[in-house]
Image (tube, grey):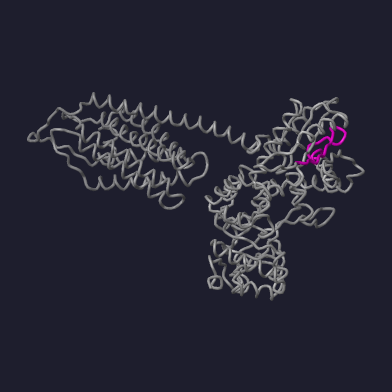
Amino acid sequence: MDALISCLVVEHTRRSLAAALIIAFVGSYLAISLVGRVRSLPLVHSWLWLLLAGIVGGMTIWCTHFAAMLGYRLDQPHAYDPVLTFLSLGAAIATTTLGMLIVCSGGKTLLVEAGGAVFGLGIALMHFIGMAGFDVPGRFVWSADYVVASLVLGAIIGVVSSSAANRIPGRWNQALATALVVLAIFAVHMVSLAGLTVVPDGTIHFPGDGLQPQTMTFFAAQAAGMVIVLGLGLLMLDAKNRKIVSSQLHRASAHDALTGLPNRRTLIEELQRMLEESQSDTSFAVGFLDIKGFKEINVVHGNAAGDFILGIIAQKIVGVLPGDAFVARAGNDEFAVLLRGYRHRQDVLKVCRRVMSEIAQPLEWQGKRIEIILHGGCALFPGDGRIADELVARVDAALQRAKRGKAGTLAFYDEALDHGERQMNALALDMRRALEDGEFRLYYQQQHLTDDRSIFGFEVLLRWFHKDLGLIPPDDFIPLAERTGFIVTLGEWVLREACMDAVHWKQPYQVGVNVAPQQLADLHFPEKVGDILRESGLPADRLELEFTESGIVENVHRAHETFARLRALGVKIAMDDFGTGYSSLATLQQFPFHKIKVDRSFVSGLPHDTLSAAIVRSTVIISESLGLRVLAEGVETEEQLEFLRREGCPRAQGYYFGKPKPRAEIEAIVTDEGAFGGPARDPGRSPVQSR
């Protein structure tokens, strides 16, 4: 210990130690900040940034060492061998880059700590190569104990610093990691030099033609400046790029990618802004325009035709309307219009008729004529409503009535005619309050293997216990939530609650959560899923997100990107209600599904209905050929279960196994070995399926 204190206080000048300390702190912080950026970059760019971060980190170690050595008090003349001196710089950069590479490729495994150990040992390697190039007319006598101690300290502190940077949450992890890296550099330097004795030896030839201290001061200063300029420059460039990307993401999240129009969320925000700025004489109209038979157009002519039509219609609406009108894509086949200054229905009717007349002209697609017909619904502020949700709900009520009329109908909200819709809209408005008041509850329906009937997972179902109306069926409130856009908020709440529940189960059962088409259309949906998984601590491979085929068809472009990002998280993806959509086989081949769920409408006819039996058999064969898992929904009888088992369908759920239960009633199951005495498991293929 005395030797260490002497090395620190006596054998080094305070000025050199202060300079080394500043270089170490600044350079280490910059290097750690750069490594933090690497994890969020695409693979192509991450390699370049990793190399640059390694250069900054390696040069920091090198500069710190030689800044301290320039103040090393030694009576004998000394110089620096140029080859070994710059070889030590290369060693520092190489080992730092290697350590960072191991850390960045390690995820949350022990490779994080392994990379830290490589980094710590790299500090020692650089130090001893540099000392080998320190020429003096004497011999170096090293204490083995101090040398080993410096190596061990470098490795251990490197491990701890890497763990701190990558495992400790919060804002202070980088500061802590920086301090630990500085400690590692100084520990290796000081502890090793504390065990060094320079014995003068006149028989040793001292060439004296190496790099002189003045020259090394110049090189060290230049390298330190390069570290700061390069590190700060890269961070500033990264910050600028992130700002640009953030702006692009904000625009993408606020606009529809296909038409370039604002999306439904932006529509609600604009409507809210107009309401907040409204005065006593303010008036405006809100209208929804719906394309009649748009899904059929997609089926007959393909999604490309549907995309083409949406783009043309968007252009025509914008071209016909006044310049101060606000146009948005409110849904898959629905456009919204805000007309400022319109007070009378007759004026609104003229504008909407002009739009509908322009769009009614047939479009040409690959030599075929496609007829476009619109339905429209309108409401006026302030007469038909004074808050955003109320206005949107009443416009939607008018649109639903228009869709029940003849082609091309344009309807205004009418309190008397829209009484039924008004009641449903009142219910829709009540959903926000219900969520805050805890009226929504999760129920869980167990999923079983058909061979031994053991449980392997649960599907999450939502129930609404209204304070006045009692239990409201999902078939009533889910469509309302989808029509008003509240399904995005509600769906996120369900996902968060389900993950929070499942992480506390003692058995690692899978948990399946349904995803609405509007959630799939949300650009930030994968990020929300990732955030929820991190908050809850639920392993990603235990979460299965279920998408309906109709929802996928409505958002084909978004679905490709979203599914890829979800798979990258490790989340499993299932197609719900298989067989009820428009192009199931094409969809299965196009998207990376983990599982398909046979719709209950096909299971209900088993085993006697020949068509249902044929569909189920075909589905099992398809799943086997594509390497997918298959589950049958709606199993209610022993005969149905036996048919599924015999035909090679390894998974099932339904009332036969039990009705959906609240979380309290499944507690005994999720903390035990599983129902029917079987363990929780879900093999890739059961023995039955492999026949």
Left or right, 627 with respect to 285, comes to left
Can I make out residue 516 in this image?
Answer: no
Q: Position of residue 579 (x, y in %)?
A: 67, 60
Can I make out residue 99 in this image?
Answer: yes
Quadrant in which the N terminus appears: top left
Q: Position of residue 493 (x, y in %)?
A: 68, 49
Snapshot quadrant of residue 450: bottom right
Outermost residue toward the front in this view: 367
Nearer-the-camera pick, 311 or 554: 311
Tell whether position 386 is magenta.
yes
Left or right, 596 with respect to 568, comes to right
The residue at 49%/39% (across/down) is 172
Q: Give the range drawn in magenta.
A: 372-392
The residue at 84%/31% (across/down) is 348
The residue at 64%/55% (across/down) is 546
Outermost residue toward the left in this view: 203
Nearer-the-camera pick, 160 or 53: 53
Left or right, 183 with respect to 677, comes to left
Q: Is residue 32 above or below residue 155?
A: above
Outermost residue toward the right in this view: 416
Snapshot quadrant of residue 289: top right
Left or right, 207 with respect to 411, comes to left
Q: Where is residue 188 in the image (x, y as percent from the top left)?
A: 30, 41
What count of labels does the image hold?
0
Q: Position of residue 380 (x, y in %)?
A: 84, 33
Nearer-the-camera pick, 377 or 252: 377
Tell whether position 586 is magenta.
no
